[in-house]
Image: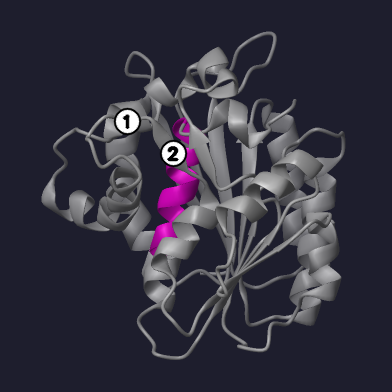
Amino acid sequence: MNYRHAFHAGNFADVVKHIVLTRILAYLMRKDAAFRVIDTHAGIGLYDLLGNEAERTGEWQAGIGRLIHVKLPAPVSDLLGPYLDIVQGQNPDGKLRFYPGSPMITRHMLRPQDRLIALELHPSDAWALRKNFADDFQVRVTTLDGWAAMGTHLPPKEKRGLVLVDPPFEEKGEFTRMAQSLEKAYARWPGGTYAYWYPIKEARDVDTYVKALKATAIPKILRIELNIDNPSTPPRLHGTGMIVVNPPYVLEEEMRTVLPVLADLLGREKRGRWRLDWVAGE
């Protein structure tokens, strides 16, 4: 599959991914010490939902479009507040048109002492990303294959932070590459938090990925999944997952609060379901 960000901006997978991202960042902000975020497949940073790519699929309407104006129960609204505030901040007139990608969301949550490294290999996307963060000294945009960051950018000098891995799945073998890159990165920086996104189309691909993660012997790996529909033939994207290594201790409880509500809101014809478990660890 080809999961270039512009075609899928604001869809159900983005919603889950970016909620997890904001909850991890909110936890890192509890301490005054600086942290660094490395976004390995950053995209362009900000997406026009009425642009050619997003309008062609219209996926955002069943994602952020369902969530942005709904009244949420108090515990969930508190947890989703940072994420929804950032999205609404890009649309000050109240009409949903622009959707922030992960580097833009991260940038809004950085404090003066924190830094973001945003990597993007696609030339036109890297140009747009650089333009969106022009003259921003807290953000460094680099045209680089994100997989290379696992060797060249770790560990960061702050010794605190997050590596976000969100590949486009343009090539075969991405699940294998993710497991291998995580093992390499963890060996260099075992104290970091890692968040890996993956699409759910075929159960056997995910099962193989999880087995490979278990084989790494990394001690704390949390799996977060949301499915909006049943599997189909031929396979199509019906779910989204996040693997989080060294998750904040509050993340599991927060996701248990959030995921049932997201399953109800984003699921197709009441077929939404969620999963939260430990691949390794607690």
In the figure, is residue 116 to the left or right of 252? right
| Residue visible at 50% across and 47% down in the picture | 17
Q: Position of residue 3 (x, y in %)?
A: 68, 31
Q: Amino acid at mark 1?
A: Leu
| Residue visible at 80% across and 49% down in the picture | 121
| Residue visible at 27% across and 35% down in the picture | 68
Q: Amino acid at mark 2?
A: Tyr
Q: Residue 20: say if magenta.
A: yes
Point out the image quarter for the N terminus. Answer: top right
Q: Is residue 264 visible?
A: no
Q: Which residue is mark 2?
A: 99
- Identify the mark at residue 96; answer none if there is no mark: 1
Helix, strand or loop status at disc 1: loop
**Crowd band around label 1 with a 10 angstrom C-alpha radius: few (<14), some (14–19), many (20+):** many
Residue nearer the viewer, 192 or 218:
192
Q: Are marks 2 and 1 in contact (CB under 8 Å)?
A: yes
